[in-house]
Image (cartoon, rainbow, N blue to C red):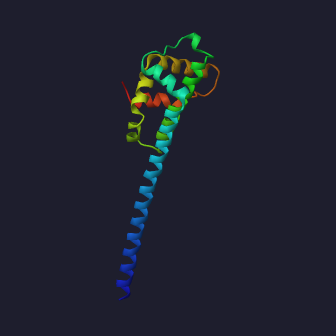
Amino acid sequence: MIELVQVIANLATTVALGIASWQLYVNSKQRRAEHIFSLLSLFHSDTAMYDIYYKIEYGNFKYDESHHLSKEEKDLDRLLGFFDNIGRLYFMGLINKSDFGIFGYEMKTMLDDDGVVAYLSFITDYSKSRHRPNPFPNLEKLRNLFPK
């Protein structure tokens, strides 16, 4: 009789742990979805980021020496920082590759643009020459994750 009670208690504990684990999994997915939605809202509501993104998307962004210290450079840095942070979340394991579907088009458009690639190369070299960390370390990793 005591063994039957122990078996029932162990079974109840196992079921309770299973339910708790499932609830944690569901809550985690919901929090991740809410976070991604807030990032998407930020991207679409930030006119500086959105404007420079559209220049890139339609092939109107050109990187040259006149770009430095301009408003456009600041806007591009903001856009690159935004996507670098998304990369950081991915490499920390807080979002997964399927979550990139929401930002995938924008991210690929930006990371495949010749002007953006040239600017990122300049920033990498500039940072190294000044013995400073690259401000966008995750973007290169993202480019490798989503090749042309």
Q: Nearer the viewer, residue 140 or 110?
A: 110
Q: Locate residue 111 relative to residue 125 in the image: left or right.
A: left
35 vs 125: above or below: below
Point out residue 137 in the picture as x, y percentages from the top left corner.
53, 30
Q: Is residue 136 visible?
A: no
Point out residue 99 in the picture as x, y percentages from the top left corner.
41, 41
Point out residue 77 in the picture as x, y percentages from the top left corner.
57, 25
Q: Residue at x 54, y 31 (%)?
A: 46
Q: Is residue 16 visible?
A: yes
- Quadrant where the image shows the N terminus: bottom left
Q: Locate residue 120 relative to residue 13 in the image: left or right.
A: right
Q: Residue at x 40, y 78 (%)?
A: 9
- Quadrant where the image shows the C terminus: top left
Identity of the residue furthest to the right in this view: 130
Q: Residue at x 52, y 18 (%)?
A: 119
Identity of the residue furthest to the top in this view: 65
Q: Locate residue 126 relative to residue 1 in the image: left or right.
A: right
Q: Residue at x 50, y 32 (%)?
A: 83
